[in-house]
Amino acid sequence: MKKKIELLSPAGDLERLKVTLLYGADAVYIGGRDYSLRANATNFSLVEIKEACTFAHSLNKKVYLTLNIVFHNENIEGVFDYINDVVSCGIDAFIVSDPFIISYIKEHFPQVEVHLSTQNSTSNIEAIKYFKKEGVDRVVLARELSLDEIKEIIDNVDMDIEVFIHGAMCTFYSGRCALSNYLTNRDSNRGGCSQVCRFAFKIGDEDNLFTMATKDLNVAKYIPKLIDMNVTSLKIEGRMRSLYYLATVIGCYRKIIDDYYSDKLSSNEFIYQEKVLSKVANRETSTHYLDHEADESDQYYTGRQEISNQDFLGLVTSYDKEKKVVTLVERNYFQVGDEVELFTPKGDVYSFIVDKMYNENMEEIEVARHPEEVIKLYLDGDISPYSMLRKKVV
Amino acid sequence: MKLVVVPKNNKDLDKYINMGVKTFIFGLDGFSVNYPVLTLEEIKKIVDKYKNIEIFISINKTIFNKDLECLEKAMDELNVLPIKGVLFYDLAILSIYSRNKYNYSLVWHQTHMVTNYNTCNYYYKKKVEYGIISSEITKDEILEIKSKTKMKLFVFLLGHPIMAHSRRHLLTNYYKTLNKPYLLEDKIISEHDKNYIVKENELGTSILDGEIINGVDFINELSNAGIEYGIISTTDIEDEILDKVIPLLNAVLKGNDKTSSDEIKRLVGFNTGFFNKKTIYKVK
């Protein structure tokens, strides 16, 4: 029987790792304190990597560590010791881009998988055959490929294939961009990318500024096709994304994937999940290269267009099953009379109107206006910590 | 150190040969980005005409499945020509090279990724004889790499460095959005008084630094350390300036340091790029 497709989530810290796994990710990719392409994310210490692996393995899930900087001489010393340490923490795979790392891992730890980072912009059958010989277990494909090109690759190579399905896109080929180095002195290939592609430039005598910024990726509608094509893993971008964003996105894709496998993916359900995904996005989205040659519809040309999202109302910290009291910490303003939804890691969604709410002393209040304020609500359901309250998706 | 010129076209060869340059890089039509491209026929004419020069051919575009058949054919056809080497970015080229016994050498040319001695050694073991060092590392890093690898190295000495390359047609898309015509001409974009050059063709869009990198102050130290080649890119530099700068660089290499380097600086400025500037990647 065909192995079920993997849903792979990013996580910038231990809490986000736990949440994404609880919300349905099959595996999580994380960065250590060094050697990762998100140098300024919180990232994981060795102790945290060990805890992450223990937690994930207890759920029969996996943890992958990004080791995908393009090394300079100064980064070499210590990296092999670091790999040894991370292996003893129980890591399941390394995501790498520099090839000398591949041979070291395969020689010393053949039981640990090596995934070739998208930083290599691997885009053809021949290059994948090369990496197969080098011992690479999985290739994260370039984000410039069409569905047909991906299918052709899968049909012609004996290699696990991972495809980005959601999140921010690079304007330039991954690995082929040093704008950040030149404009801000931050090394993009060592995790210092300052997103210069989102800067606004003057161009000639034009009144309109020139930006190179792209819309985000969202290929939810192609999940069934990607499953049928035998893609191994579907990857979500965003190790610096919030708990709410990750829970929402992972929850949506979990539902789409599971419903497709069980033949229950109705068009209404799909439309709803797409709505939820669009609500959590802070930029417009596109399918980019997957179904067309990227064009002007995939770009922003009028400066920054980012939307601040205030739909996340509160994070559930506990639930008293007997009294049916939900305790949550407030994240954004809401009040009595608001239409809201509480969604859970299991995928359940409870829609209701807030008729009454209470402060931590169970004194009735009308408005939750202070971030981190403890709020209590009455609600009957199968509710667990890390459930989240949001504005109703309409 | 030998000076290597990336000319604007094949018509300039005689001029540069007369200036003492004996090594040139061209791109192969349809397979190269950010190099002047020639067809196989044109390359053949050059190698027939000029017997005592070294020609390197760049095949540095990102390769897609649809390119593979033509790519292997082109690599086969290059094999019958007396070219010195092929510059590659995509690992498809190394894969094809590994199963064929080609006469030419390979040059590792992953623009921003040739940054450490271990990876140089990795590729050297794979029979890749040459590497073009990334323009974003320091002179000290280059010297350390040289001291720890047998790979023969090229360093970008003078010209507008490539900063980024995209499959997207960023200028076409921009002008389409504005409902204005765009005729594939280069554009200058600017931010905080710094200019950058945007070039678009059928393979996508590239951004170059608007300022010329001038490595004249480091040329002798790099040469003395054994760096084999110093690249001069003529892209977007006026011929009048190049005609003066290239002989001056040769003079610097021959020991006429002070006067010649001062004149080069007067002609192209003294932006030393990353030769003396370390990039940061972690903000504490």
Image (cartoon, grey):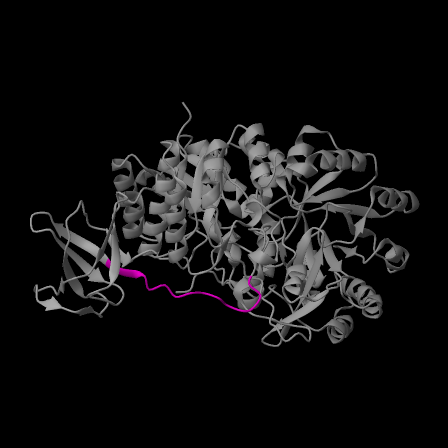
Quarter in which the N terminus of chain B is drawn? bottom right
Q: Residue at x 73, y 45 (%)?
A: B31
**What residue is rendered at 69% in x and 34% in y?**
B97
Q: Is residue A235 left or right of residue A210?
A: left
Residue segment shown in magenta: A300-314
Q: Position of residue A50 (x, y in %)?
A: 28, 43
Residue A378 visible in the shown view = yes
Please report the residue visible at 28 percent of the width from the left and 48 percent of the height from the top.
A19
Judged left or right of residue B131, residue B280 is left
**In terms of image quadrants, where is residue B240?**
bottom right
- Tell me the chief SS of the magenta region: loop
Image location of residue B214, percent across then percent down:
69, 67
* A191, A345: nearer the viewer: A345
Please count the marks in the image. 0
Q: Position of residue A302 (x, y in %)?
A: 56, 69
Examine the image and state in which quarter residue A357 appears: bottom left
Answer with left or right where residue B181 lies relative to residue B274.
right
- Front one among A51 and A139: A139
On the image, which quarter does residue B245 sit in?
bottom right
Q: Is residue A104 visible?
A: no
Q: Is residue A114 one of those drawn in magenta?
A: no
Residue extending furthest toward the front = A268
Above or below, A88 against B11 in this view is above
* Residue furthest out toward the right: B49
As rendered, which of A186 and A265 lies closer to the eye?
A: A265
Q: Position of residue B272 (x, y in %)?
A: 64, 68
- Please check the rendered image and state whether residue A304 is part of the magenta-colored stretch, yes or no: yes
Image quadrant occupied by the C terminus of chain B: bottom left
Residue B272 falls left or right of residue B185: left
Q: Identify the residue at horizontal 38%, vertical 48% (top origin).
A: A273
